[in-house]
Image (cartoon, rainbow, N blue to C red):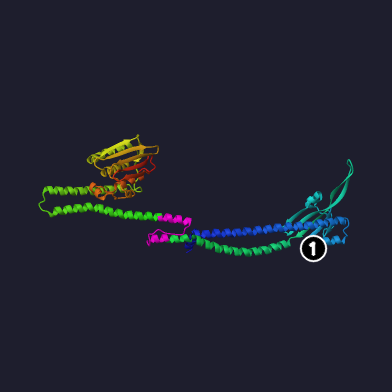
Amino acid sequence: MDINNGFKIKDIFKSLRVRFFIIVFLTGLISCLVVHFVILESYEDRAVNVKSTEVQTQLRILANHLIVSNYLQDTSSEVINAELDMLANLYDGRVIVINDDLKVVKDTYNISQGKTIISEEVVNCLKTGSKGAVSKYDESNGYIEIVTPIIESEVIEEEDVSLSERSGEVVRGVLLTSASTDTIVTTMSILSRRAQTIEIIIILVILVFAALVSILLLSPFRRITAAINDVKAGYTDEPIKGPNYLETEQIIKAFNALLKRMKALDDSRQEFVSNVSHELKTPITSMKVLADSLLAQEDVPNEVYREFMADIGEEIDREDKIINDLLALVKMDKKASGLNITSVDVVNLTEVVLKRMRPIARKHNIELTLESKRAITAEIDEVKISLVIMNLVENAIKYNKDEGWVRVELDADHQYFYVKVMDSGTGIPEESLDSIYERFYRVDKSRSREIGGTGLGLSIARNAVLMHRGTINVESRLDEGTTFTVRIPLTSTATQGK
């Protein structure tokens, strides 16, 4: 049970919808948390700076009062003491007055008076004057420590070319003040609670939003999956349709193209089986009729017997040719057979093939010629390329006119060699050019039957060319002739057969 649950959890996390939901939700959650902490930190820094500036201003005013009332020498002024106590109470802190001998003159807590304070900040303040004024925020203890110089302005006389006066500043002491930040902490606590409430609401909204978006955006894929399952189950074979999203359009186009290809293959397979059955059945039917005719007659003359047997022999030859062509076509299956690659003299190979075809050409009064523009050596399967040239030349001869011609041209460049088979034949209708490589397809079925064609020659040739990663193209005009152009790489990239 646990194992099954484990598999279910894995399947859930494999879901694109779940992953999309998690990404959107985490993005919103992290954004909320970042904004929360940034705002609180910014508020705290701003509040501390404002309070430090405010206290510094009050302390500078108080420092001036201390100088005017000569408080550093006489601390009996009730007004100054009241101001010090009021300032300490106002900021819920402590004020310590220190003279230039580092002696505590006044402590609002009344615990350090008369003591000596040696502090780096106090010493620096006494040395540097107004430049030594500093404030430091102690976040752990919740207070701001401020060091403010008590400065006395005095007139100093100097002797120069003439007597002149200049104003100077002398540090007479330091105000060491601590101001509580409880109000800031309290305000931050209130803001934090409010922010958390808002964040919870925002997170719930993001949660719902992420769920809706993941469902809405991925629903087209669910509909596509359902449509594909319908095709798979056999409920329909129509192309699927879906929303006009770029991603779904690409998937739908790819699947519809695959579906079209599968339908074409299925139709081709059914047609192939039908054609094979018909082509194999026709000679058998003819032989059956001839044999039944012989059996139905008594005392058949030898001449008639020989004539019938000759017809039966022709039908057997025709059946044998169909079977041989079918076997050759099966062997041309790119997945079922490899290539026996060798280095071949293409010109010599073509001459050998044409030598075999010349008796057929002479029988039909067809002039068969070869023109080679250069010596050509290529890495090819000699048997299969021979079949290509032989089938193209044989078709050019059979579907030609009396006293016609067939011309074979060979050429090559740095990458490919070319075989061009041209004839002066009857030509191929334009509407049939896309179908001539289909198995058992015949442009002129009646004439093909007369000359013994099986409708497999061009299919065999095309498969052999494709196995060599080559191309075969045709140009034709009715009553003017046909030109087949084959292009084969000089160097083979196919796996050699063993």
Tell me if residue 237 is in the magenta stretch.
Answer: yes
- The residue to which callout 1 is attached is 89
Question: Is 174 displayed left or right of 497 in the figure?
Answer: right
Tell me if residue 252 is in the magenta stretch.
Answer: yes
Q: Where 34 falls versus 491 (above or below)?
A: below
Magenta part mainly helix, strand or loop? helix
**Where is residue 150, by image quadrant?**
bottom right
Q: Residue furthest top?
A: 374
Q: Which residue lies at the image location 17% right of the left edge and 52% below the top edge?
A: 290
Name the spot of residue 67 as percent of width and height, x first. 86, 55
Question: Is 172 displayed left or right of 294 in the figure?
Answer: right
How many residues crowd around disc 1 within 10 Å: few (fewer than 14), some, or many (20 or more)?
some
**Where is residue 103, by image quadrant?**
bottom right
Q: Which residue lies at the image location 83% right of the left edge and 61% below the top edge?
A: 83
- Please name the amino acid that badge 1 sits on: Asn
Mark 1: secondary structure:
helix
Q: Which residue lies at the image location 85% right of the left edge and 60% below the top edge?
A: 80
Asked if one can make out residue 425 in the rendered structure from this viewpoint, the answer is: yes
- Of residues 117 and 51, the one nearer the viewer is 51
Asked if one can make out residue 144 in the rendered structure from this viewpoint, the answer is: no
Name the spot of residue 377 as percent of width and height, x first. 35, 36
Question: Is 219 displayed left or right of 414 in the figure?
Answer: right
Q: Where 86 falls versus 254 (above or below)?
A: below
Tell me the quadrant of the picture where the C terminus can be found: top left
Residue extent of the magenta highlight: 227-256
- Of residues 460 and 402, the one nearer the viewer is 402
